[in-house]
Image: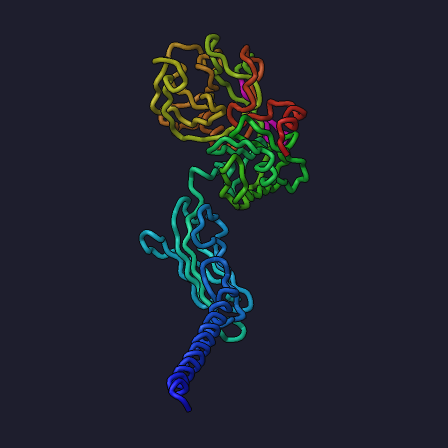
Amino acid sequence: MNLEQLVTTPDIAARRALRACAALVIGALTLTACGWSANADNEDGKGGKDSAASAAKIVISAKDGSSGASINTTGVKVSDGKLTDVKMTLADSGEAVPGSLSADGGSWKPKEQLERGTKYEISASAKGVDGRTVAADSTFTTVSPANSFIGTYTPDDGTTVGVGMPVSFNFDKAISDKKAVQSHITVTSSSGQKVVGHWFGEQRLDFRPEEYWKAGSKVTMKVDLDGVEGANGVFGVQKKTVTFTVGRSQVSTVDVDTQTMTVVRDGKTIKSVPISAGSAEFTTYNGQMVISEKFTKLRMDSRTVGLDNAYNIPDVPHAMRLTQSGTFIHGNYWYNKGNPPFGRQGTSHGCVGLQDVQGGQGDTPSKWFYDNSILGDVVIVKNSPDKTVTPDNGLNGWNMAWSEWVAGSAA
């Protein structure tokens, strides 16, 4: 062995040793990378990872880092396993959001509707059918008020209403895709009557049948607007079912010529009472009007309807709204001051007055009518020198021909 061999042999040995060590390190890295890759492959895409290839898969409906999450349907589900723990909190304060786990452990959802434009955090864990655990988490923000719309509606769930009550939506933003919105609201009646929607402008949508609802029928409204784009970048957030009952049929007819009102219930006349309609200067609308609000006592100030200092009565008894512009049928305790007997002439500023006493406590025609009326009852005014009330002034779409009503549907 020469000197060169003496020098190079250890070097070669060292390089071999280094290569062996490198191989071990690379092998270790390969194993580590494969182990991480297995977890990555099992990521649920919602901010969490499975541990050691668990069979269970957790899905949080709102993706981690997302905005515009639903305030109705956000929740957690698991497949091939059961949820063992779910925590939801307000991201800013850490306040817990109560929720409920399904009986089979397969899903979890908040107990109440979430707030719009709010940041939340969800962390969840589950055990797979193979006994292995899995965890997931997500931080997200719900849809903002600026990018969402809601509709206030009448009538309320569980109520009993008169035969004239339409289903009426007023949206808080202009709707440009009316077809998309209307197609996600369905109104059906147990009577089998065909119900059609009609748009009044860009923010109001009413539904009614061709004729008044059948007495005793059940009406169901299904709203599935959550996530529906009503305008560019503006999405619905409501998802609910509302059911109401149509009560007995009561239609009252005010004849301005005779200054009387005849009350017909279920096809039979049950009472006729004197009224005081609008004066010659302030006539009462003609047409079919629906009682939309009731007040045992109400201040009536002429300034709210554009009449300066014409009247300001703090305690009008038994007031029931007929139009949005200010037409009521209400008690009148001031009529006899210098006027002929009640019902001989019209003296109001367009309302229909019924004989009453101050405080509304007496046995009067006004109190009787108030006690025997419900929201949705119809009051028809005829023979007034005024025009017919417009269909969108109050809940008064019955004054529109059916063909015109159907033409205003977007569905």
Residue 103 in view here: no
Quadrant assignment, res 270: top right
Main secondary structure found in the magenta portion: strand
Magenta extent: 260-269
**Closer to the camera in the image, 130 or 269:** 130
Q: Which residue lies most toward the left here?
A: 93
Q: Is residue 267 magenta?
A: yes
11 or 304, nearer to the observer: 11
- The quarter in which the C terminus is drawn is top right
For the point 47% across and 62% down, which residue is it? 101
Question: Where is residue 153 shown, x and y percent of the image?
Answer: 50, 36
Q: At x 55% / y 68%, what residue is drawn? A: 80
Q: Residue at x 57, y 29 (%)?
A: 199
Q: Quadrant of the N terminus?
A: bottom left
Q: Is residue 219 above or below residue 174?
A: below
Q: Is residue 386 magenta?
A: no
Rendered image coloring scheme: rainbow
